[in-house]
Protein backbone atom coordinates (compact mmCIF):
# COMPACT_ATOMS: atom_id res chain seq x y z
CA UNK A 1 0.00 0.00 0.00
CA UNK A 2 1.03 3.59 -0.52
CA UNK A 3 2.80 5.85 1.95
CA UNK A 4 3.79 3.15 4.38
CA UNK A 5 0.33 2.06 5.52
CA UNK A 6 1.10 -1.60 5.04
CA UNK A 7 -1.31 -4.45 5.58
CA UNK A 8 -1.11 -5.92 9.08
CA UNK A 9 -1.06 -9.62 9.99
CA UNK A 10 -4.53 -11.07 10.68
CA UNK A 11 -6.22 -7.97 9.26
CA UNK A 12 -8.61 -7.23 6.43
CA UNK A 13 -8.09 -3.67 5.22
CA UNK A 14 -10.14 -1.57 2.83
CA UNK A 15 -8.05 1.55 3.37
CA UNK A 16 -8.28 4.27 0.75
CA UNK A 17 -4.63 5.45 0.78
CA UNK A 18 -5.24 8.30 -1.66
CA UNK A 19 -7.24 10.06 1.05
CA UNK A 20 -4.52 10.00 3.70
CA UNK A 21 -1.99 12.86 3.65
CA UNK A 22 1.67 11.84 3.89
CA UNK A 23 2.22 13.38 7.34
CA UNK A 24 -0.84 11.62 8.71
CA UNK A 25 0.33 8.33 7.23
CA UNK A 26 3.75 8.76 8.84
CA UNK A 27 2.24 9.47 12.25
CA UNK A 28 -0.13 6.49 12.00
CA UNK A 29 2.65 4.11 11.02
CA UNK A 30 4.67 5.25 14.04
CA UNK A 31 1.70 5.02 16.39
CA UNK A 32 0.74 1.49 15.27
CA UNK A 33 4.32 0.28 15.55
CA UNK A 34 4.61 1.56 19.13
CA UNK A 35 1.16 0.25 20.09
CA UNK A 36 2.00 -3.22 18.77
CA UNK A 37 5.27 -3.30 20.67
CA UNK A 38 3.83 -2.20 24.02
CA UNK A 39 0.31 -3.60 23.82
CA UNK A 40 0.50 -6.66 21.57
CA UNK A 41 -2.76 -8.25 20.40
CA UNK A 42 -4.85 -5.35 21.73
CA UNK A 43 -6.15 -3.61 18.61
CA UNK A 44 -8.88 -5.41 16.68
CA UNK A 45 -9.55 -2.54 14.26
CA UNK A 46 -8.45 1.05 13.75
CA UNK A 47 -10.57 3.54 11.79
CA UNK A 48 -10.24 7.13 10.66
CA UNK A 49 -13.17 9.51 10.35
CA UNK A 50 -13.41 13.29 10.50
CA UNK A 51 -11.85 15.64 7.96
CA UNK A 52 -9.57 12.99 6.45
CA UNK A 53 -12.47 10.72 5.53
CA UNK A 54 -14.36 13.48 3.67
CA UNK A 55 -11.29 14.90 1.89
CA UNK A 56 -11.30 18.07 4.00
CA UNK A 57 -8.06 17.66 5.98
CA UNK A 58 -6.15 20.93 6.36
CA UNK A 59 -2.51 20.57 7.30
CA UNK A 60 -1.70 22.39 10.52
CA UNK A 61 -5.38 22.68 11.49
CA UNK A 62 -7.02 19.25 11.33
CA UNK A 63 -6.51 16.43 13.81
CA UNK A 64 -6.41 12.69 13.15
CA UNK A 65 -9.88 11.64 14.30
CA UNK A 66 -10.04 7.92 15.10
CA UNK A 67 -11.89 5.08 16.72
CA UNK A 68 -9.77 2.17 17.90
CA UNK A 69 -11.60 -1.08 18.59
CA UNK A 70 -9.88 -3.12 21.29
CA UNK A 71 -10.28 -6.85 21.89
CA UNK A 72 -10.87 -6.69 25.62
CA UNK A 73 -11.75 -4.39 28.47
CA UNK A 74 -8.73 -2.23 29.19
CA UNK A 75 -6.90 -2.58 32.48
CA UNK A 76 -5.52 0.42 34.35
CA UNK A 77 -2.03 -0.61 33.24
CA UNK A 78 -3.10 -0.68 29.60
CA UNK A 79 -4.75 2.73 29.85
CA UNK A 80 -1.53 4.06 31.40
CA UNK A 81 0.47 2.56 28.52
CA UNK A 82 -1.87 4.29 26.05
CA UNK A 83 -1.45 7.55 27.96
CA UNK A 84 2.32 7.31 27.58
CA UNK A 85 2.02 6.44 23.87
CA UNK A 86 -0.20 9.46 23.18
CA UNK A 87 2.11 11.70 25.17
CA UNK A 88 5.07 10.55 23.09
CA UNK A 89 3.12 10.96 19.86
CA UNK A 90 2.23 14.54 20.82
CA UNK A 91 5.90 15.38 21.38
CA UNK A 92 6.94 13.81 18.10
CA UNK A 93 3.97 14.95 16.01
CA UNK A 94 2.50 18.18 17.47
CA UNK A 95 0.34 18.39 14.35
CA UNK A 96 -1.56 16.44 13.24
CA UNK A 97 -2.61 15.20 16.67
CA UNK A 98 -4.42 11.97 17.49
CA UNK A 99 -7.98 12.63 18.67
CA UNK A 100 -10.11 9.61 19.46
CA UNK A 101 -11.56 6.86 21.61
CA UNK A 102 -10.80 3.25 22.43
CA UNK A 103 -14.00 1.23 22.22
CA UNK A 104 -15.00 -2.42 22.27
CA UNK A 105 -17.26 -4.26 19.85
CA UNK A 106 -19.92 -4.18 22.56
CA UNK A 107 -19.76 -0.37 22.65
CA UNK A 108 -20.23 -0.07 18.89
CA UNK A 109 -23.10 -2.56 18.86
CA UNK A 110 -24.89 -1.13 21.89
CA UNK A 111 -24.62 -4.19 24.14
CA UNK A 112 -22.32 -2.57 26.70
CA UNK A 113 -24.64 -0.12 28.46
CA UNK A 114 -22.67 2.31 30.58
CA UNK A 115 -19.32 1.29 29.09
CA UNK A 116 -16.47 3.69 29.81
CA UNK A 117 -14.25 4.42 26.81
CA UNK A 118 -10.94 6.30 27.28
CA UNK A 119 -10.79 9.42 25.14
CA UNK A 120 -7.49 11.03 24.10
CA UNK A 121 -6.82 14.47 22.62
CA UNK A 122 -3.79 16.77 22.53
CA UNK A 123 -1.62 13.92 23.78
CA UNK A 124 -3.60 13.55 27.01
CA UNK A 125 -6.20 11.24 28.47
CA UNK A 126 -9.19 13.58 28.62
CA UNK A 127 -11.38 11.20 30.57
CA UNK A 128 -13.85 8.41 29.88
CA UNK A 129 -16.90 8.70 27.65
CA UNK A 130 -19.83 6.63 26.54
CA UNK A 131 -19.92 5.71 22.88
CA UNK A 132 -23.21 7.19 21.68
CA UNK A 133 -24.54 5.34 18.67
CA UNK A 134 -26.52 8.42 17.60
CA UNK A 135 -23.49 10.70 17.55
CA UNK A 136 -22.64 12.43 14.29
CA UNK A 137 -19.22 10.78 14.76
CA UNK A 138 -20.81 7.32 14.70
CA UNK A 139 -22.75 8.23 11.56
CA UNK A 140 -19.59 9.48 9.90
CA UNK A 141 -17.71 6.34 10.88
CA UNK A 142 -20.41 4.15 9.33
CA UNK A 143 -20.79 6.18 6.13
CA UNK A 144 -17.30 7.54 5.46
CA UNK A 145 -14.85 5.79 7.78
CA UNK A 146 -11.49 4.57 6.49
CA UNK A 147 -10.15 1.20 7.62
CA UNK A 148 -6.50 1.49 8.60
CA UNK A 149 -6.42 -1.89 10.27
CA UNK A 150 -8.84 -4.68 10.95
CA UNK A 151 -12.38 -5.55 9.95
CA UNK A 152 -14.65 -3.77 7.49
CA UNK A 153 -16.74 -1.20 9.35
CA UNK A 154 -19.97 -2.93 8.32
CA UNK A 155 -18.87 -5.91 10.46
CA UNK A 156 -20.17 -3.98 13.46
CA UNK A 157 -23.90 -3.36 13.75
CA UNK A 158 -23.82 0.42 13.80
CA UNK A 159 -27.30 1.90 13.33
CA UNK A 160 -28.38 4.49 10.80
CA UNK A 161 -31.20 6.14 12.73
CA UNK A 162 -31.48 9.65 11.35
CA UNK A 163 -34.36 10.55 13.66
CA UNK A 164 -32.24 9.80 16.71
CA UNK A 165 -29.21 11.51 15.20
CA UNK A 166 -31.19 14.64 14.38
CA UNK A 167 -32.42 14.76 17.98
CA UNK A 168 -28.83 14.65 19.24
CA UNK A 169 -27.82 17.45 16.84
CA UNK A 170 -30.70 19.63 18.02
CA UNK A 171 -29.69 18.88 21.60
CA UNK A 172 -26.16 20.05 20.77
CA UNK A 173 -27.52 23.25 19.22
CA UNK A 174 -29.76 24.01 22.21
CA UNK A 175 -27.14 22.96 24.74
CA UNK A 176 -23.53 23.66 23.84
CA UNK A 177 -24.06 26.29 21.13
CA UNK A 178 -26.87 28.25 22.77
CA UNK A 179 -24.84 28.42 26.00
CA UNK A 180 -21.75 29.44 24.00
CA UNK A 181 -23.68 32.38 22.52
CA UNK A 182 -25.10 33.37 25.91
CA UNK A 183 -21.63 33.43 27.43
CA UNK A 184 -20.40 35.65 24.60
CA UNK A 185 -23.33 38.01 25.23
CA UNK A 186 -22.75 38.21 29.00
CA UNK A 187 -20.42 40.98 30.16
CA UNK A 188 -19.50 38.81 33.16
CA UNK A 189 -18.07 36.09 30.94
CA UNK A 190 -14.47 35.89 29.70
CA UNK A 191 -15.91 35.06 26.28
CA UNK A 192 -17.51 38.51 26.09
CA UNK A 193 -14.23 40.37 25.35
CA UNK A 194 -12.79 37.35 23.58
CA UNK A 195 -15.22 37.61 20.69
CA UNK A 196 -13.91 41.13 19.95
CA UNK A 197 -10.35 40.00 19.28
CA UNK A 198 -10.21 36.22 18.84
CA UNK A 199 -10.41 35.16 15.22
CA UNK A 200 -10.42 31.55 16.41
CA UNK A 201 -13.64 32.13 18.34
CA UNK A 202 -15.28 33.69 15.29
CA UNK A 203 -14.35 30.76 13.07
CA UNK A 204 -15.35 28.22 15.74
CA UNK A 205 -18.77 29.77 16.33
CA UNK A 206 -19.83 30.67 12.81
CA UNK A 207 -18.62 27.52 11.08
CA UNK A 208 -19.60 25.28 13.99
CA UNK A 209 -23.30 26.10 13.71
CA UNK A 210 -23.24 26.04 9.91
CA UNK A 211 -21.99 22.43 9.94
CA UNK A 212 -24.89 21.41 12.16
CA UNK A 213 -27.32 23.37 9.99
CA UNK A 214 -26.06 21.45 6.95
CA UNK A 215 -26.34 18.08 8.70
CA UNK A 216 -29.86 18.68 10.01
CA UNK A 217 -31.06 20.01 6.65
CA UNK A 218 -29.33 17.53 4.34
CA UNK A 219 -29.07 14.45 6.60
CA UNK A 220 -25.36 14.20 5.86
CA UNK A 221 -22.05 15.63 7.06
CA UNK A 222 -19.62 18.18 5.71
CA UNK A 223 -16.47 20.02 6.72
CA UNK A 224 -16.33 23.47 8.31
CA UNK A 225 -15.47 24.92 4.93
CA UNK A 226 -18.26 22.96 3.31
CA UNK A 227 -20.73 24.15 5.92
CA UNK A 228 -19.76 27.78 5.36
CA UNK A 229 -20.01 27.48 1.58
CA UNK A 230 -23.39 25.79 1.93
CA UNK A 231 -24.66 28.60 4.15
CA UNK A 232 -23.68 31.15 1.51
CA UNK A 233 -26.09 29.39 -0.85
CA UNK A 234 -28.95 28.94 1.59
CA UNK A 235 -29.16 31.75 4.17
CA UNK A 236 -30.18 35.42 3.64
CA UNK A 237 -27.56 37.69 2.10
CA UNK A 238 -27.36 39.87 5.20
CA UNK A 239 -25.32 37.08 6.84
CA UNK A 240 -22.93 36.45 3.97
CA UNK A 241 -20.25 38.87 5.13
CA UNK A 242 -19.72 37.20 8.50
CA UNK A 243 -19.74 33.76 6.86
CA UNK A 244 -17.07 34.89 4.42
CA UNK A 245 -15.09 36.34 7.33
CA UNK A 246 -15.13 32.98 9.09
CA UNK A 247 -14.09 31.21 5.89
CA UNK A 248 -11.33 33.79 5.45
CA UNK A 249 -9.99 32.96 8.93
CA UNK A 250 -10.20 29.21 8.27
CA UNK A 251 -8.22 29.64 5.06
CA UNK A 252 -5.47 31.60 6.83
CA UNK A 253 -6.08 34.87 4.99
CA UNK A 254 -4.83 37.67 7.24
CA UNK A 255 -6.91 40.50 5.78
CA UNK A 256 -10.25 40.97 7.54
CA UNK A 257 -13.40 41.95 5.68
CA UNK A 258 -14.34 44.19 8.63
CA UNK A 259 -13.09 47.61 9.61
CA UNK A 260 -14.79 47.42 12.99
CA UNK A 261 -14.37 44.60 15.52
CA UNK A 262 -17.56 45.81 17.23
CA UNK A 263 -19.59 45.31 14.04
CA UNK A 264 -17.94 41.95 13.44
CA UNK A 265 -18.77 40.75 16.94
CA UNK A 266 -22.37 41.91 16.55
CA UNK A 267 -22.69 40.08 13.24
CA UNK A 268 -21.33 36.83 14.73
CA UNK A 269 -23.94 36.80 17.47
CA UNK A 270 -26.76 37.85 15.16
CA UNK A 271 -25.90 35.09 12.70
CA UNK A 272 -25.50 32.42 15.36
CA UNK A 273 -28.83 33.28 16.98
CA UNK A 274 -30.45 33.11 13.54
CA UNK A 275 -28.89 29.72 12.82
CA UNK A 276 -29.92 28.27 16.20
CA UNK A 277 -33.50 29.32 15.48
CA UNK A 278 -33.35 27.89 11.94
CA UNK A 279 -32.01 24.56 13.15
CA UNK A 280 -34.91 24.24 15.57
CA UNK A 281 -37.37 24.97 12.77
CA UNK A 282 -36.06 22.27 10.42
Image: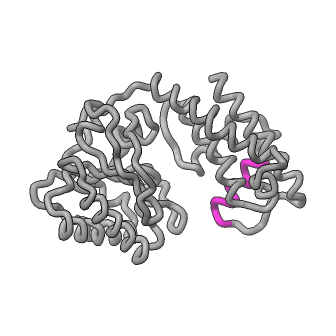
Q: Is residue 215 left or right of residue 119?
A: right
User: Which of the 4 quarters of the picture holds residue 97?
Assistant: bottom left
The percent position of residue 99, horizontal first and vertical second, equals 42, 57
Residue at coordinates 36% horizontally, 51% vertically from top-left? Answer: 118
Residue at coordinates 24% horizontally, 54% vertically from top-left? Answer: 75
Asked if one can make out residue 213 in the rendered structure from this viewpoint, the answer is no
Q: Residue furthest left?
A: 10
**Does the magenta stretch mainly form a helix, a strand or a loop?**
helix
Q: Is residue 278 left or right of residue 83?
A: right
Please tell me whether residue 190 is drawn above or below residue 112 in the rendered image. Answer: below
The percent position of residue 163, horizontal first and vertical second, equals 47, 22
Residue at coordinates 34% horizontally, 46% vertically from top-left? Answer: 117
User: Which of the 4 quarters of the picture holds residue 157?
Assistant: top left
**What range is drawn magenta here?**
241-252
User: Which of the 4 quarters of the picture holds residue 3?
Assistant: bottom left
Q: How many marks?
A: 0
Q: Is residue 44 left or right of residue 18?
A: left
Please tell me whether residue 65 is drawn above or below residue 155 in the rendered image. Answer: below
Residue at coordinates 52% horizontally, 26% vertically from top-left? Answer: 167
The percent position of residue 147, horizontal first and vertical second, equals 27, 51
The percent position of residue 98, horizontal first and vertical second, equals 40, 62
Please tell me whether residue 175 is drawn above or below residue 268 in the rendered image. Answer: above
In front here: 22 or 42? 42
Amino acid sequence: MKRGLTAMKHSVSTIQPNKIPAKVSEALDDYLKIADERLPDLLESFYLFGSISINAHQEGLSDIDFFAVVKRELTEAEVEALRQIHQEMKRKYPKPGLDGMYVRREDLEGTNEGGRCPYFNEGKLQGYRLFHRNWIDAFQLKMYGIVVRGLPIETYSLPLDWKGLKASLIENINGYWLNWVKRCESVRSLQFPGLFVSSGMIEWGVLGVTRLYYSIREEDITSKMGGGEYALRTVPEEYHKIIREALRIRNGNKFSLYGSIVKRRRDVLKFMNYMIKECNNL
